[in-house]
Image (tube, rainbow, N blue to C red):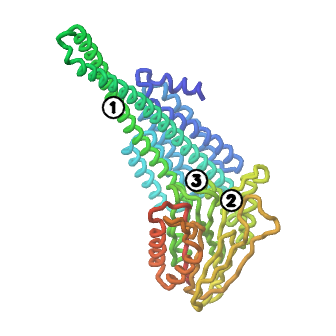
């Protein structure tokens, strides 16, 4: 990698300031990653006989490789960057068209176009590329579904490789800006230490000056008899004042440099925050979209509050044959580690339910537990990462009732039937998903037939575990009492009441965990 930097970057525009080579290095990183990804995906497409995508990957890999030579020409960095982003966009258009148009699994990758432009160019260029990406997606919406050349039997494999690539890019971007932030903080710490040392030196010099002035005052009565001595003292005082003026100028110069560095650090922090916001957008893209929620759940509310920018909680929704399947999961940890677990969980659920057609709730949890142990190699590493989850399936029993099948890993299901007056809790199994678990414990299905308009509640433990300023938790008892009070209300009002109670709980304290809470009113 150092040889590549020396060839493409160190000698790049020798007349330019070498301190301004951050963006050329970042562009070189992106081009090398794009070449590597195209080569890997070309091999994958060849293996699964996805021939058009195989050739498109080879074309893109060749184009990006040849474009590296632009660094050795007089073409401006801005033009090289626009050419690279344009090449990426054309590649995504091609892959989307080849894999189904608006239903293509490649569409979420369009979010990287504005992210790359924000990083490599400026805010104005980023918004221009964002608008172009939105217009292209809009064009796919108008065109609709196109002929997919991706073999159906290999669709999951291709999707898995895309999701893995997405996770790798998120990890790389997060790591890059984390290192940048650490370096900036270390630099600021060193500068503050230098300023402190200079301040202490200034204080010592001031004390010397005060002492000298006191000597002058004490000798005023002997001025006539000691003119020579007075002249010596005056010269000494003048020398000290010169030192003082020099120290003051040095201090002002140091303060100016620190102010400039603070401005630079603020700009870097804004840059990092924009990148993290892009990661939030990517994570939100894997959650069920609003149209799907409205179609399958009809009357519902969802409270989704990450503790940090990205969340360790997620929900999954799909309909297989006559079953509507909903899952609410609470992954180990929060922030970036928890977010990676949500992507693993979402991918495995797609595989288990949509590919293998396992729809029995208990069987889904058992299979998810096994797959997480395999993916994370937990039998070798003793890793305890995993998740707690609630899974329900909804089936129409007759014109008046819905059959609800529930299985839980640690977390319960709450429901209120229209012919009852109190919330009923169905506890989950005392077993988590992933990690080393007691093999004698198994996930169990619970089946209830509920009248239409009955209420279901499920989610993570973040709501009931949230403490107030006196460190008192919200608690399960208070949660059930609150659900009993709000169950008769319309769903939007229920959400408002829960969020108001949560806001009161959070007064003068901080959120301790990700929060996910879902309410559903059963509809025909």
Q: Is residue 115 above or below residue 453?
A: above
Report how far apart the C-alphas of labels 3 and 1 lie in the structure.
57 Å
Residue 426 rendering spot, x and y as whole percentages? 67, 79
Chain-order first, disc 2 or disc 3: 3
Q: Is mark 1 on a helix, strand or loop?
A: helix
- Quadrant in which the N terminus is drawn: top right
Residues under numbered marks 3 and 1 in contact, where contact means CB atoms less than 8 Å apart: no
Which residue is under mark 2? 386
Residues under numbered marks 2 and 3 in contact, where contact means CB atoms less than 8 Å apart: no
Which residue is nearer to you in this view: 22 or 323?
22
Q: From the viewer's perspective, tell me whether residue 128 is left or right of residue 168.
A: left
Which residue is under mark 1? 256
Q: What element carries label 2?
A: loop
Question: At x 54% / y 70%, what residue is drawn?
Answer: 292
Chain-order first, disc 2 or disc 1: 1
**Quarter assignment of residue 504:** bottom left
Which residue is under mark 3? 98
Residue 140 rendering spot, x and y as whole percentages? 49, 58
Question: How many numbered callouts?
Answer: 3
Question: At x 54% / y 68%, what residue is drawn?
Answer: 472
Report how far apart the C-alphas of labels 2 and 1 lie in the structure.
50 Å
Question: At x 55% / y 83%, what residue is drawn?
Answer: 523
Residue 311 visible (yes or no): yes
Q: How crowded is mark 1: few (under 14 residues within 10 Å), some or many (20 or more)?
A: few
Q: How crowded is mark 2: few (under 14 residues within 10 Å), some or many (20 or more)?
A: many
Query: Which is more foreground, mark 2 or mark 3?
Result: 2
């Amino acid at each position: 990698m150092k040889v590549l930097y020396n060839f493409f970057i160190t000698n790049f525009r020798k007349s330019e300031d070498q301190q301004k080579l951050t963006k050329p290095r970042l562009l070189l990183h992106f081009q090398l990653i794009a070449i590597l990804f195209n080569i890997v995906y070309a091999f994958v497409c060849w293996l699964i006989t996805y021939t058009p995508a195989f050739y498109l990957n080879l074309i893109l890999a060749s184009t990006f490789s040849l474009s590296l030579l632009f660094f050795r020409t007089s073409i401006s960095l801005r033009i090289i960057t626009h050419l690279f982003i344009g090449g990426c966009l054309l590649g995504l258009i091609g892959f989307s068209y080849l894999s189904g148009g608006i239903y293509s699994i490649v569409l979420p990758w369009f979010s990287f176009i504005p992210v790359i432009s924000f990083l490599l160019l400026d805010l104005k260029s980023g918004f221009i590329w964002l608008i172009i990406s939105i217009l292209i997606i809009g064009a796919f919406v108008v065109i609709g579904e196109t002929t997919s050349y991706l073999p159906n039997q290999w669709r999951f494999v291709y999707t898995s490789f895309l999701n893995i690539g997405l996770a790798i890019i998120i990890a790389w971007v997060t790591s890059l800006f984390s290192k940048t932030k650490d370096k900036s903080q270390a630099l600021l710490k060193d500068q503050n230490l230098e300023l402190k040392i200079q301040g202490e030196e200034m204080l010592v010099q001031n004390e010397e000056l005060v002492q000298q002035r006191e000597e002058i005052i004490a000798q005023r009565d002997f001025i006539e008899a000691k003119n020579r001595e007075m002249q010596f003292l005056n010269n000494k005082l003048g020398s000290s004042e010169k030192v003082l003026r020099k120290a003051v100028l040095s201090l002002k110069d140091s303060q100016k440099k620190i102010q400039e560095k603070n401005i630079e650090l603020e700009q870097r922090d804004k840059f990092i925050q924009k990148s993290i916001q892009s990661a939030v957008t990517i994570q939100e893209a894997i959650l069920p979209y609003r149209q799907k929620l409205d179609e399958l759940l009809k009357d519902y509310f969802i409270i989704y509050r990450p503790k940090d920018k990205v969340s360790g909680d997620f929900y999954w929704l799909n309909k297989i044959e006559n079953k509507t399947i909903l899952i609410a999961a609470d992954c180990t940890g929060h922030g970036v580690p928890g977010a990676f677990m949500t992507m693993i969980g979402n991918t495995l659920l797609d595989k288990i339910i949509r590919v293998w057609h396992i729809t029995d709730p208990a069987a889904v949890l058992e299979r998810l537990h096994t797959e997480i142990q395999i993916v994370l190699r937990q039998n070798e590493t003793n890793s305890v990462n995993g998740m707690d989850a609630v899974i329900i399936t909804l089936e129409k029993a007759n014109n008046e009732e819905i059959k609800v099948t529930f299985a839980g890993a640690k977390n319960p299901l709450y429901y209120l039937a229209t012919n009852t007056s109190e919330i009923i809790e169905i506890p989950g199994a005392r077993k988590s998903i992933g990690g080393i678990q007691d093999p004698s414990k198994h996930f169990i299905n619970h089946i209830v037939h509920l009248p239409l308009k009955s209420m279901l509640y499920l989610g993570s433990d973040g709501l009931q575990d949230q403490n107030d300023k006196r460190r008192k938790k919200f608690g399960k008892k208070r949660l059930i009492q609150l659900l009993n009070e709000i169950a008769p209300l319309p769903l939007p009002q229920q959400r408002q009441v829960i969020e108001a109670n949560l806001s009161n709980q959070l007064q003068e304290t901080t959120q301790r965990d990700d929060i996910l809470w879902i309410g559903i009113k059963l509809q025909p």
